[in-house]
Image (tube, helix red, strand yellow):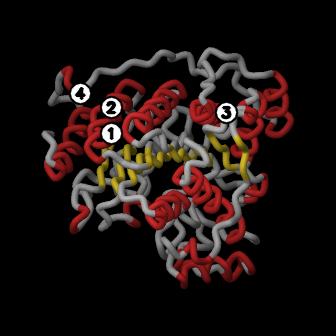
Amino acid sequence: MSGRAQLMWDEAVTGYDFGRDHPMDPVRLALTRSLVGAFGLDREVKVVAAKAAGPSTLRLVHREDYIEAVRAASADPAAADQSYGLGTMDDPAFAGMHEVSALIAGQSVGAAEAVWRGEALHAVNFAGGLHHAMPGAASGFCVYNDASLAIARLLELGAERVAYVDVDVHHGDGVQAAFWEDPRVLTISLHEHPRTLFPQTGWPEETGAGSAEGGAVNVALPAGTGDAGWLRAFHSVVPELIADFRPQVLVTQHGADTHFEDPLAHLAVSLDAQRAVQVACHELAHEYADGRWVALGGGGYAVVEVVPRSWTHLVGIAAGRPVEPTTMIPEEWRQQVYARTRQPAPRRMTDGRWPVSWAAWDEGYDPADRLDQAILAARRAVFPLRGLLP
């Protein structure tokens, strides 16, 4: 064991289950954990099960009345109060909902604590990244906002600058809202344009308020954006902002639903591009945050074909033992997938698009290209507020 990385895992997180027909199937977590084990990556990290987030921790972000509403719905799902976003089609109430949601939050908070205290350089909670939950409401399959709670805990521990980078296909609205007026937190979200996707927020003009103006960054990508455009957008916005902000900790959210096979969105990104961004986040953490990196999961609804491979790559990168894209997937895992889901499993850790390439921003702006228009809109909205040239 290297000691440089922690994997936050408790089997009980698979109890985050909205029901058989809900897109967020917890099998995606179980299959990811087993693929991590099939590659022996769990021998390269310290596997830690943190405690569930308690009331005082949850209150760092969430209102007391909302926490009580979650507890009540957890005890009696039929009595869920929809005014809090509970018992809805997106967020059906289920028995034990509070307990397992608090457990997932606890893993992300534990990851943040370990990284800040130097117990680990990197920490991964792929069960986390539930970035839509608001201080007083569930939203978008998210009950407690573990990403916001991890950041809030870092601030409580004394961090003065925390950067959050969200590459889920959906806007990281809950995290943005939590730190909208807090200049200690820089939130950057790359997502499908709000005209075409939930939660219909994340416009470039959303830049923060008060002393935190310029602290929220939104890159709203056209539907259909593929690898080259997605990577061009990331590298045209994120590294320059991180270099300027110089965070003490980098927190990243790696929703796998940007993938071209994801059933709930409209980007066309490959597993190989997702891996490239994971590598880039790792490098940014080392270059600007002394290596302190908290990496979370998020969305992802191609639960066999995409999610386990994407997040296994993430664990491998954090562990210092990245899985080469051309690697064949162990046959025992593929058999397990078929036994559990009756779906055929992928054979390799690539979509066949490795290595991926993109054009850097300084190679030229095409005013007729919708992707370049989206990048420029984000840069024009935020960069001058931070004293940078758009």
Residue type, mark 3 in image: Ser
For mark 2, does the 10 Å Cα neighbourhood hold few (<14), some (14 to 19), or many (20 or more) residues? some
The image shows residue 130 at horizontal and vertical percentages of 55, 57
Confirm or deny contact between disc 3 and disc 2 (CB under 8 A): no
Amino acid bearing label 1: Val
Secondary structure at badge 1 equals helix
Which image quadrant is residue 361 in? top left
User: Which numbered disc covers residue 238?
Assistant: 1
Q: Are marks 4 and 2 in contact (CB under 8 Å)?
A: yes
Q: Amino acid at mark 2?
A: His
**Mark nearer the N terminus (4 vs 2):** 2
Q: Classify 10 Å Cα crowding around label 1: few (below 14), some (14-19), many (20 and above).
A: some
Indicate which label's residue lies in the foreground, 3 or 2. 3
User: Counting other residues with Cα less than 10 Å from the Cα at mark 3, is it few (<14), some (14-19), or many (20 or more)?
Assistant: few
**Residue occupied by mark 3:** 2
Mark 3 and mark 2 lie on one chain; the one further toward the N terminus is: 3
Mark 3 and mark 1: span between their CA atoms? 29 Å
Q: Are marks 1 and 2 in contact (CB under 8 Å)?
A: yes
Residue position for label 4: 361
Query: What residue lies at 32% left-to-right and 45% top-to-bottom?
Result: 246
Q: Of the numbered discs in the image, which one, if any, rests on residue 229?
A: none
Local SS, label 3 = loop
Quadrant placement of the C terminus: top left
| Above or below for 209 versus 315 | below
User: In the rendering, which numbered label is found on residue 235?
Assistant: 2
